[in-house]
Image: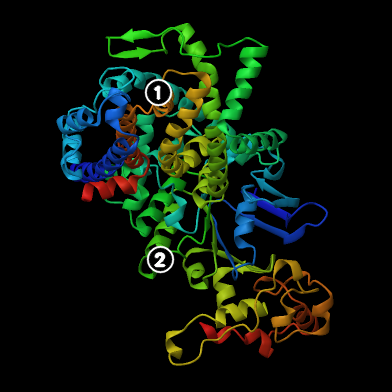
Amino acid sequence: MALLEVKNLNVSFGAKHNAVPVLFDISFILHRRERIAIVGESGAGKSTLGFALVNLLSKPGHIHSGTVKLDGTNLTTLTSPQMQKIRGKRIAMIFQDPMVTLNPVITIGKQMVEAIRAHTSINRHDAKKIVLEKLAQVQIPAPDIRFDQYPHELSGGMRQRVIIATALLLTPDIIIADEPTTALDVTIQAEILELLKSMCEENNVALILITHDLGVVSRVAERTMVMYAGRIVEEGPTLEIINDPQHPYTQGLLNALPQMTLAGHKLNQIPGSMPSLSDRPNGCAFHPRCQYAIEKCQIKQPNYIYSGISTVACHVLEDMISETSSSDSAFLNDGKDVL
Amino acid sequence: MFVFLLRRLLQACIVMLIISLLSFVIQGNLGDPVRQMVGQSVTSEEVEKIRQEQGLNDSFFQQYGRYIKNALHGDFGESYFYKEPAFHVIMAKLPATIELTLAAIILTIVIAIPCGVFTAIRPKNLASHGIMFFSTIGLSTPIFITAILLLYVFSALLQWTPSFGRGETVSIMGLWESGFFSLDGLYHLILPSISLSFILAPLFIRLIRSEMLEIMESEYIKYAKAKGLSSARVYFIHALKNIMLPIITIGGIQIGNIIAYTILTETVFQWPGMGSLFIDSINRVDTPVISAYLMVVGVIFVFTNTLVDLVYGLFNPTVKLAVKDV
């Protein structure tokens, strides 16, 4: 059985009658020890999805319909005390900006010990032992000194290590990492990612990595989901998607990556910008920015189809697949020369 | 820490010097002190002689210097009314005022923290609306009106509480007359402390509420929830500890207001403290007591503000570091 099974998850903002939908029919499966990535531009709903999974949507956001099953238990129907037992214990989170994630007036040690004691009856002394052990595991020098320090006495990278260590304290089933390296110095981004990956491997933890950086994805995640305007538009094995992106949006994202070999050239970009939630275009939300858009794209939401490489929601691709079984068209090869 | 205290001490000296100058000027200009002493039926020659004896004809700076010198010895001259050193008169009334403010502050904390937190985490609850409504009323009603109203309802109509004075007091080592240790004393404390906190609590409820609302949106509160902590821990440890800083800051500033409010409260309830003594002394043009009061209040003010700055370090780890570094 899948560890996490998300089915037709719909999330809306606002009161019931004039709610603005932000996530549409999100469905995916996460297996034990698997690492998946959710990729997309800002505003695609990636973080919203992350928070929806643990039922921590900021008001007025709420789950409109759908299920999130953890080992068969539907999390969306749990009471808040029941959900509290899941958070931190079975699903831990890592936030984007380590500078603001830790409470500035409580010591690192206390913030970690309380995470253990919220879910277990381990006494303070033993909890401290576990904390020091985990701090050492994430390669924090002199954990016993750090234990009594306040967040402001640590660098950004150190803090993110502390947060990773906190996530691992109770060896959860899943860690949801919401842009864990975005706020960090470029020089330590790779280090933190590598740490996150190896920690998940060592502790048999599954990872949901939320990011806008496709470079990050290839290093860490086995599978990738690309999100656009609240919908998953492409989903499949990471390497395949990066080598041969199917959806025009994924192609655009990959084309937009800066490349050393093209120094001096203008960066590629996807024309236009992500629509705001309140005026989502009809049909495929990406059609106003899509160079392949056909008439159908403006009218009807595309269904998911399997292209042989990944699962994609695109009319053009669907037509092409039904017309010819070959994939020699210019469109399908567009992203190939990127990497 | 030491340097910090030293610097604070220097600031305190400057503040006290300015206050002393003011109180000295007041003392010199509230009527003719010789007339206060001897009355009308004295010849102008005799008056002149007394002026000379008392040093009243010396230059301003000579007189001020003498005033400072005496003040440092706790000597503010003799009260015209009590025929006792003014400083002793003030000190005898100090415990009553301090106990009243202490009771009001405790009451304010006990009321404001739960109410403030509650209105922030349940903003749409009916009780929250009620609390906010009453806090608006409390904030905008002058203290003498609330005090008189309370007095009318609970003392005059219902006769539940005594209407004036401190009641029975217990002497602690002959130094401090305390009303905290006798039932009668506590009984007398109820109404005055309630009316004092009636104006303080709403301010802090609103402050705590708005700070809480802001903090609740912060990432670290969301993170605390994501760790699976109980709501009580999230609100009362993670959030409240962060809002202590603005509360302490405002609290420090409010100390001045509390002193001012005690004058009014003490007058209404005939509470035998410094405040009512001050008002009486103004009526009697008892200038030594007035100037002694100003100096004592000045010291209290400077002292509590220094204390507030030190407490600040307890709640703000970055401040502690800065103090260490100096």
Which quadrant of the view contains residue A9? bottom right
Q: Residue at image x 29%, y 37%? A: B28
Q: Nearer the viewer, mark 1 or mark 2?
A: 1
Which quadrant of the view contains residue B65? top left
Q: Name the residue under label 2.
A: A189
Q: Are marks 1 and 2 on the same chain?
A: no
Measure how far apart labels 1 and 2 are at the Cα level.
Answer: 68 Å
Q: Position of residue B35 (x, y in %)?
A: 30, 28
Q: Name the residue under label 1.
A: B277
The amino acid at mark 1 is Leu
State left or right for residue A85 relative to residue B288.
right
Q: Position of residue A81 (x, y in %)?
A: 62, 34
Question: Label 2 marks which chain's residue?
Answer: A
Judge whether residue A87 can be spotted in this image: yes
Q: Quadrant of the N terminus of chain B?
A: top left
Q: Which mark is residue B22?
A: none
Q: Looking at the image, do the residues carrying marks 1 and 2 touch, with CB atoms under 8 Å apart?
A: no
Judge whether residue A24 can be spotted in this image: no
Q: Position of residue A236 (x, y in %)?
A: 62, 68
Secondary structure beneath label 2: helix
Q: Residue at image x 44%, y 58%? A: A197
Question: Label 1 marks which chain's residue?
Answer: B
Q: Residue at image x 51%, y 82%? A: A339
Who is closer to the viewer here, A187 or B314? Answer: B314
